[in-house]
Image (spheres, coloured by chain):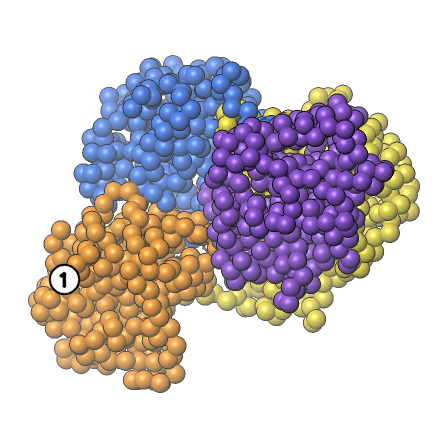
Chain colours: A blue, B yellow, C purple, D orange
Amino acid sequence: MSVDLTTNFCGIELEHPVINGSGTFDAIAARRAFGEELVRSFPFSAFVSKTITIEPRDGNPPPRLWETPAGMINSIGLPNKGLKGFLEHDLPDLSLLPVPLIVSVMGTSHDEFTALVEEVGTRPEVAAMELNVSCPNVESGLIVGEQPGETRSLLEALRPITEKPLIVKLTPNVADPAAVARAGEEGGADAVSLINTLKASAIDPATLRPWLGAGSGGLSGPSVRPVALHQLRAVADAVSIPVIGMGGICNGADALAFIATGAALIAVGTENFRDPAAGSRVRREFAGELERRGIGSLSEVRGKGLPEVALNLKSRSS
Amino acid sequence: MSVDLTTNFCGIELEHPVINGSGTFDAIAARRAFGEELVRSFPFSAFVSKTITIEPRDGNPPPRLWETPAGMINSIGLPNKGLKGFLEHDLPDLSLLPVPLIVSVMGTSHDEFTALVEEVGTRPEVAAMELNVSCPNVESGLIVGEQPGETRSLLEALRPITEKPLIVKLTPNVADPAAVARAGEEGGADAVSLINTLKASAIDPATLRPWLGAGSGGLSGPSVRPVALHQLRAVADAVSIPVIGMGGICNGADALAFIATGAALIAVGTENFRDPAAGSRVRREFAGELERRGIGSLSEVRGKGLPEVALNLKSRSS
Amino acid sequence: MSGNGSHRVLAPFGRRALEVADNHCSDGYRIFSLRDQDGPVPSAGQFYMLSAAAHWAQRDERPFLPRAFSVADAVEAEQGLRLDFLVDDVGPGTARLAGLEPGEQVWVNGPLGRPFSTPSDLAPGAPGAILVGGGIGVAPLAILRRQLADRGVPTRILLGFRDREHSGGLEDLFACCEVRLATEDGHAGHKGYVTDLLAVLLEGDEAGSAAVYSCGPPPMLEAVRAMCEASDVACELAMESPMACGFGACFGCAVPLAGGGYMRLCVEGPVVGGDQIETALVAGSGHG
Amino acid sequence: MSGNGSHRVLAPFGRRALEVADNHCSDGYRIFSLRDQDGPVPSAGQFYMLSAAAHWAQRDERPFLPRAFSVADAVEAEQGLRLDFLVDDVGPGTARLAGLEPGEQVWVNGPLGRPFSTPSDLAPGAPGAILVGGGIGVAPLAILRRQLADRGVPTRILLGFRDREHSGGLEDLFACCEVRLATEDGHAGHKGYVTDLLAVLLEGDEAGSAAVYSCGPPPMLEAVRAMCEASDVACELAMESPMACGFGACFGCAVPLAGGGYMRLCVEGPVVGGDQIETALVAGSGHG
Ligand SMILES: Cc1cc2nc3c(=O)[nH]c(=O)nc-3n(C[C@H](O)[C@H](O)[C@H](O)COP(=O)(O)OP(=O)(O)OC[C@H]3O[C@@H](n4cnc5c(N)ncnc54)[C@H](O)[C@@H]3O)c2cc1C
Ligand SMILES: Cc1cc2nc3c(=O)[nH]c(=O)nc-3n(C[C@H](O)[C@H](O)[C@H](O)COP(=O)(O)OP(=O)(O)OC[C@H]3O[C@@H](n4cnc5c(N)ncnc54)[C@H](O)[C@@H]3O)c2cc1C
Ligand SMILES: Cc1cc2nc3c(=O)[nH]c(=O)nc-3n(C[C@H](O)[C@H](O)[C@H](O)COP(=O)(O)O)c2cc1C
Ligand SMILES: Cc1cc2nc3c(=O)[nH]c(=O)nc-3n(C[C@H](O)[C@H](O)[C@H](O)COP(=O)(O)O)c2cc1C
Ligand code: FES
Ligand code: FES
């Protein structure tokens, strides 16, 4: 293939820019379902774990899913084995994957985040950490990711603990995501990723009451893509650190739109549910989209689109 | 029909709870296209005008539309004849409609809003006014609808000017819409309406640059319905004034979900584009949904869903 | 409703489900017909908003909105009016419509918009009409040709096509009248652009004595507009712009006006006078 | 892959487009078959995630996600494996699948999940099996019956149906073996619930000497679970819960565990031991 897809992300060499969204692909469960083929043709250039917490969590009562027009709502509630269980049971299996491992962590206080980043960061199997800040800080009662101040101080607390890349996973449920991203960068984040899910609810047609066991959840899938592209643009323009773009990416054309909007990497989430190998397909289609346009490397279009000269004006005015 | 759809909204008697979203139905243009039949079988129980401003506006450069999965992005840019042009040319025509008229206004300062509410409010043809606060206040530079403080002070400034109902049109692009709604209520608003469009962008597949002439726009249609239902719940729980619910309503089942979530009225927006008589169809289907369930009046389910006893548990656990 | 074909015919209020009567391929384009029992006879230049009643969303959950199509002909038949449309498959919506089977249902809103004017209204004293069509743009000219013929207006027809694959539905639509052809690949008629043929006509002495009606790709429309302006000949252009509603509700179909500001093409157009606009090149229109 | 039918058969990685070989109606339910050239032979109790390759979205832009279906039979044929599924039309996804024409393509991910255990694994020394199915729930029992028969396991089959309209595909699926029937309208067999028939068997002396396998509506499953628990008979239930992915990725298919906490039904199930759960009534499951 004439197109160069390799990408250096925070010093990590990646074969291509397609990774997974946290919580949308369980490599261990997938291996049970698909066997070694999953490892042989692993769909992502890096694997992002589901978010882990200090203590084990059962997750939310069912129902946890609701299908929406061109998307879905989930209210999973971060079920996980807890830090200890993850390090003991999951990390050994995840370290067998052929790609760098990014571990997503969430704490409800600086202490919890500190413990998570310390413990996880020292593991050689771990290449980077993603901070899920879509949760309240018990000390302030505020959602960290909704407050630039909270986000900055969290990063300032965590930055000294580890050399490894820290990625801030932004929540889209704010008026100004760029301000939060900037605060993260100022606090020492190496990258930001977006979007997480949009707050959403559904009504049970039979009871006319909330369908989801937890009352509400998060919207994802193609329906949120236009919102993701908008916030990606705002954030990519506001920070100089790399941005991981996600939100409704289903195919190579979507991936190209996110790269052109400023994403360093793109993550596939909900689409994994419709096609377990979506990551490989998106990468293939994405390379094809670049070739069709004669684009040799990502830097040619990232964040700016096609150069004026190359512009095919047809779709604009002829 | 055995179901009673009449609704009293801020003292205005309405035949049913289905109105239009501002800017999604132009009764004057529709009359040119469909003739008197439009007036004879007017689809809404009250008509909400497109937002007007003090000065005339041309609107944004094209392209202004982008179709999205289960929705669309618009960047229309509030084209309108300005206050004077509206009062002279549009108001006479709108006063011929068989339903109460709600005029949507937007200002960039307290003075502009004051002038709009004074002028429009004194017109007998006008039943109520909707305040579009999704714009920056030139004095503070802040988007009024994103700031509880800005919203409260705006309402405090406008409340003394008119006896007529003032509706605050909330923007969904905030972390806590309920806080803004509460501020509006404290400031003296008679009702709130939500949701306005979600900030969104699209990439031209040919140029890999922003498709929309204005760079970005607002997302609407079925894809935003789950977000609308979530914010509607949060707002309806937070205020005691009536709430107008909208966002992706396409049929009677959607309307029922919004009423069950706490809406006093529901507004049809984007669906009007797919079916000019969508309002009438939604009302018809909505009445059918109520009848099927043996619900005699809206108050039986508004904001609470079916009573435990009536619960058909089938879809939950049997 | 009468069919004299030059006034803005009103549409029934609310979308209606019509049945596909026929759908066949003709030289690269699909011609499909709807049976309209209760709708009025449209005027030439008007359009309809169409969407398949079932299976509309094709790829990536699109299309969501209906699509605009100029009516290419409207013929009274036993089972009611037959509406003909020409479809150029350029994306999911046109692909779905092009694939409709007879008997399938289509949601219809129309006729909509401003039709072509009569030559006399357009250019007082102009005895004749010159129709200039390019590619899929021949659609509204086909019904215009018939409605002009019904009124006995002498009409000359200039049509341009890319190649053999895109010389859509000529026979059916322009039968029984003299057509001058231009094709880019020269497989038929003049090798080159249809505007070359128009230039010849406009240079000829009869120039001023005719009104020009044109529809086609924006660059062709713009050439026609400029040429008519230069030789001071009245012209009307059937334009396109992205449309969500088609009846003035969304303000999405903005086209820049010569005097500044915008018009809603679905209300003030799709037929516009050459003097109303500065250019026929509109951002977002064209089949990209 | 062998077809001994009691181990977790792995799925090829990535969704595959398979062709619909047949789709016919049988007493209220649709039975449709896919031709699977390169897939493995599934074990009884496993399921597939299915979606139509074209025109998936039906109403309100749904379905978006694939749908889970227990394989009802898997038969080697010349053109490769034939996978049979039973479809109960309860919404847009099942409606679309029920309407598929032979030759249409279906996206397939599977076989997935934990299959039924052998009677001996389930209840050491249990010589026989009792299959208890209700309505559409007969699907996984059909292939289980065949795979048990292949292994010469003595099997008694109890099936319950609402009425004549819903006595799905009996003949085809349970031909050649003795079936005791219960129908709520009494049009065939015992008038009442299938669990009445199970009660009789469990009271009989042979009770402990068999393992019970059941699939059907949650209330029926719960009754079977409780009865087997009461009479201390080992049982396995093929359950349902809302699924987005089917391979452990979304954590959406949570079913409460007896010991507290949840299992992912697509990974730990859909076949679960009666002792693993406190109740078979799961919020969000069932066909509304
Ligand atoms: C008044 C009028 C009359 C017309 N008459 C005819 C006719 O007689 N025959 C005919 O064939 N066509 C006609 N058209 C054009 C026709 O409406 C369009 O070709 C059609 O809407 C394209 O829809 P699509 O889904 O097939 O393609 P789309 O996917 O909509 O693509 C068509 C163009 O739209 C843009 N586009 C791509 N993706 C999107 C998106 N997500 N959102 C918005 N824009 C996008 C691109 O520029 C693309 O080239 C007419 C248009 C108008 C306004
Ligand atoms: C392991 C397994 C095996 C199965 N095997 C079979 C089988 O062999 N045959 C068979 O017919 N079925 C089987 N099912 C059930 C089948 O998967 C469902 O009936 C199907 O998913 C329904 O989809 P639908 O679009 O037709 O209906 P839906 O619209 O999805 O409605 C089905 C139910 O889902 C709920 N619902 C309604 N709207 C929504 C929404 N927007 N989002 C989420 N939930 C909603 C309601 O409770 C409704 O009653 C199986 C399920 C599982 C988990
Ligand atoms: C079922 C589900 C579970 C998710 N769990 C997590 C999680 O544990 N941590 C996290 O940061 N994001 C989580 N997400 C958000 C995704 O990583 C992603 O940000 C979002 O879904 C948008 O991308 P998409 O539209 O491609 O799915 C989850 C999303 C889904 C649908
Ligand atoms: C084309 C378009 C124009 C709109 N113009 C306005 C406007 O002028 N003022 C306003 O308050 N809301 C405006 N809206 C927002 C709608 O009133 C409504 O809040 C939003 O579209 C969500 O509802 P829907 O999903 O049913 O369309 C507009 C929406 C669309 C799609
Ligand atoms: S298409 Fe909506 S106003 Fe013209
Ligand atoms: S359905 Fe996704 S984890 Fe089970």
C64 on left or right of D251 = right
Q: Quadrant of the C terminus of chain B?
A: bottom left
Q: In the image, residue D259 lies at what x, y percent?
A: 29, 53
Q: In the image, residue A197 lies at what x, y percent?
A: 48, 37
Mark 1 belongs to which subunit? D
Regarding residue D169, the answer to whether it shows in the image is: yes
Single out the residue that lies furthest toward the front.
C205
Regarding residue C280, the answer to whether it shows in the image is: no
Q: Identify residue type, mark 1.
A: Thr
- Residues A13 and A317: in front is A317
- A86 relative to B240, above or below: above
Please give the residue where the numbered disc 1 appears in the rendered image.
D118
Q: Quadrant of residue A287?
A: top left
B285 on left or right of D21 = right
- Residues C158 and D22: in front is C158
- Residue at 65% across / 52% down in the picture? C73
Q: Local crowd at mark 1 within 10 Å, few (<14), some, or many (≥20)?
A: many
Q: In the image, residue C138 lies at what x, y percent?
A: 62, 41
